[in-house]
Image: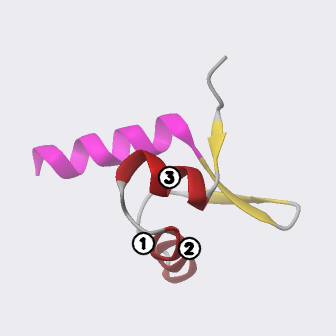
Amino acid sequence: MDKDYLDANELEGMTGTPASTWRYWAHIGDGPQSIKLGRRRVWKKSTVLDWLAAKESA
């Protein structure tokens, strides 16, 4: 089963973009929308894929 939510480390493995960059983008309000689940920052996989697709077509 595919995970619906990914953390910064999983996004790094998926995209090659460092986990610290994903966390920084979330901190400054850039990049795809993320949420806090408890103390963890996570991104909905479908939101990230849509954001990446929009970047590719821009």
- Where is residue 10 drawn, in percent x and y? 57, 50
Q: Nearer the viewer, mark 1 or mark 3?
A: 3
Queried whether the magenta region covers residue 24, the answer comes back as no
| CB under 8 Å between discs 1 and 2 | no
Counting residues from the N terminus, which is met first, the one under dot 1 or under dot 2? 2
Mark number displayed over residue 30: 1
> What residue is shown at x 39% (from left), y 39% (from top)?
49
* Residue that protrudes farthest toward the left in the picture: 58
Total numbered labels placed on residues in the image: 3
In the image: residue 46, left or right of residue 42: left
* Residue found 37% across the figure and 63% down from its top: 17
Measured as percent of width and height from the top left, residue 37 is found at 82, 56
Q: Residue at x 49, y 34 (%)?
A: 46
Give the magenta range: 44-58
Residue 20 drawn above or below residue 13: below
Callout 3 environment at 10 Å: few (<14), some (14 to 19), or many (20+)?
some
- Identify residue for label 2: 23
Q: Nearer the viewer, mark 1 or mark 2?
A: 2
In space, the residues marked 1 and 3 are separated at their CA atoms by 15 Å
Q: CA distance from mark 2 to mark 3?
A: 10 Å
The colour scheme is: secondary structure
Element on which disc 3 rests: helix
Label 2 crowd (10 A; few <14 / some 14-19 / many >=20): some
Q: Percent from the top left, x then y, of residue 40?
A: 78, 63
Residue named by callout 3? 11
Could you say which quadrant of the image residue 41 lies in?
A: bottom right
The local secondary structure at tag 2 comes to: helix
Q: Is residue 51 magenta?
A: yes
The answer to whether the residues at label 1 and label 3 have Cβ atoms under 8 Å apart is no
Label 2 is placed on what type of residue?
Arg
Q: Is residue 42 above or below residue 14?
A: below
**Disc 3 residue type (three-letter):** Leu
